[in-house]
Amino acid sequence: MAKLALALLAGSATAFAPAAKSAAPRAAPLNAVGVYYSTTTGNTETVAGYITAATGIEAADIDEADDDTLLSMDTLICGAPTWHTGADEQRSGTAWDEFLYDRLPSLDLSGKKVAIFGLGDQGSYGDNFCDAAGELYDCFTAQGATVVGMTATDDYDYSDSKALRDGQFCGLLCDEDNEYDKSEGRVNAWIEQIKGEGVSF
């Protein structure tokens, strides 16, 4: 009789034990941040590497990112060079040109933050310094994104830029051709700035 009581007691105890958890669907972590770039000469990839070093987030070519992954992010950090100087669109000469006009228009980025970094050459192309960054700004804001990380124009020697918005650059601008020694410091300061604007790493 005692054995039967113990068996019943053990059985009732397991009935109240928590059920084994099934695997939850995989989702992006809160405050998920993605770093995306495309490059022609490797300069944009170099600066993306500085961003990776500062944030711990591995940068990926925009051509390798699928739309679902992009939409799962809370913040997108996006970088492009300027290759087609003076062009009204498709200024980067990279995979961004296709992404901005073929894929991005179908994505709703309302409520998401975008931080832009651009690469240019103040010495040879000072009239079109980092123009592609301005194109990213226009295309992403048209899809509802809020741009963070605007920067001051001091400490640059350029003539004109389509990346100017209300007297500021629409993001971090770097010149690996003439000021490569400033890029890493500019990145580190910019990352601290966008942390203060609500981007969590």
Image (cartoon, helix red, strand yellow):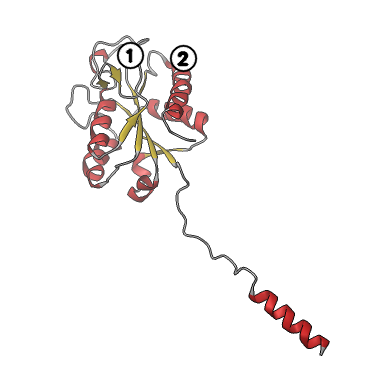
Residue at x 38% of width, y 13% of height: 178
Determine crowd level at label 2: few under 14, some 14-19, many 20+ residues with C-alpha closer than 10 A: few
Residue at x 27% of width, y 41% of height: 99
- Residue 38 appears in the picture as rendered: no
Q: Is residue 22 or residue 92 the one in the foreground?
A: 22
Asked if residue 98 is positioned above or below residue 159 in the image, the reply reads: below
Q: Quadrant of residue 164?
A: top left
Q: In the orientation shown, which residue stands out farthest toward the right? A: 2
In front: label 1 or label 2: 1
The residue pinned by badge 2 equals: 181
Q: Is residue 13 or residue 81 the one in the foreground?
A: 13
Q: Position of residue 108 (x, y in %)?
A: 27, 45
Residue type at numbered disc 1: Thr
Give the CA separation, mark 1 to mark 2: 18 Å
Q: Quadrant of residue 70?
A: top left
Residue at x 25% of width, y 23% of height: 131
The kind of secondary structure element at disc 2 is helix
Residue type at numbered disc 2: Asp
Q: In the orientation shown, which residue stands out farthest toward the bottom? A: 1
Q: Is residue 12 left or right of residue 53?
A: right
- Residue 157 appears in the picture as rendered: yes
The kind of secondary structure element at disc 1 is loop
Q: Give the mark nearer the N terminus: 1 vs 2.
A: 1
Determine crowd level at label 1: few under 14, some 14-19, many 20+ residues with C-alpha closer than 10 A: some
Q: Position of residue 1 (x, y in %)?
A: 81, 90
Asked if residue 35 is positioned above or below residue 119 in the image, the reply reads: below
The residue pinned by badge 1 equals: 153
